[in-house]
Image (tube, rainbow, N blue to C red):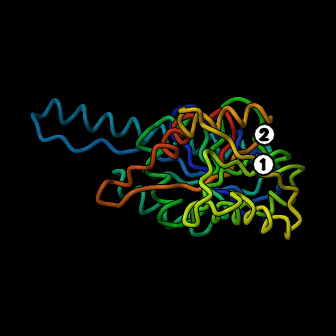
Amino acid sequence: MSFKTILSVVGAKDAVSDISKAIELSTELDAHLSILAIGTALPPIASDYPVATAWIEQRQAEINALLEVRQNGEDMCRSNGVSFDTDYLYDDRFILESNLSMRALYADLVLLGDGARHDSDIRKAVVAGTVFDAHVPLLLAPAKGKSSLRPKNVLLAWNSRAEAARAAKEALHMLIEADAVHVVIVDPDSSYFKNGGEPGADIAAFLARHGVKVVVEQVASGERSVEVVLRQHALEIGCDMIVMGAYGHSRLRERVFGGVTASILEDCEFPVFFAR
């Protein structure tokens, strides 16, 4: 499946850079671009009149900033000849999640640029609403370097879990076109209920049947965290995309993501394709 509709979620900060990345990726695939500018609404304040007035004014200022982002997005898309639509949302985080989930149903891919990614409320709302609720893949595009949906050298983070398999299948058309796909297993466990007798062999065989040029790489952590190992290995092999599953806990814990997912979400110098 190719990506024909990309939903780009941007905030008020560094929006021009995020929109530029989205336009580049949409142009690369001749895809339709939906730009959604979002902001987390200030909670109501029950206080004296002057404070309440300041609260209302600040809310309006934040809405105006999103409207400006939306207008900039429209202007940039028109000047680049991109098929597009734009909208904005300003509400509390959980309503944002619900709206993002609904909108993601009509997209092949959700894009989160570096500016919006570093707003923790936006980041959490986007991941929860799209990857976890709508089960739509998410691409994190770093500020530096070129992001591409036609990567040539891919690192597939593998741990023999359903989420990792889902990510591989969602990214399959990209993996097929890549020059090399590195299936990377950190501290493999050859027991039956872990990675199997030959860790990585099963997913490598599956991918090879689809024509993927795949190599399995078993990496020892040396007591480093998994996310540090993945970043370092990605740098060593010169990959231009990391593909991985997203992992999380129950809704009762507000979807507190597992350590690897959380760390990669917060900061990674490579484009990261998440699915669950």
Relative to 94, say whether 230 is above or below.
above
Residue 205 versus residue 32: which sits nearer the camera?
205
Q: Residues within 10 Å of mark 1 (few under 14, many from 20)?
A: many
**Residue 56 position within the rendered picture, expressed as x and y whole percent measured from the top left:** 27, 39
Q: CA distance from mark 2 to mark 1?
A: 9 Å
Residue 12 versus residue 205: which sits nearer the camera?
205
Find disc 2 in the rendering and name its residue.
239
Q: Residue 136: which disc?
A: none
SS under mark 1? strand
Of circles 2 and 1, the one toward us is 1
Identity, as a three-letter code, of the amino acid under mark 1: His
Q: How many marks?
A: 2
SS under mark 2? loop
Dividing the image into 4 quarters, which one contains the N terminus?
bottom right
Relative to 8, say whether 168 is above or below.
below
Circles 2 and 1: CB atoms closer than 8 Å: yes
Mark nearer the N terminus (2 vs 1) = 1
Q: Residues within 10 Å of mark 2 (few under 14, many from 20)?
A: many
Find disc 1 in the rendering and name its residue.
182
Residue at 74 percent of width and 52 percent of height? 183
**Residue 55 position within the rendered picture, expressed as x and y whole percent measured from the top left:** 25, 35
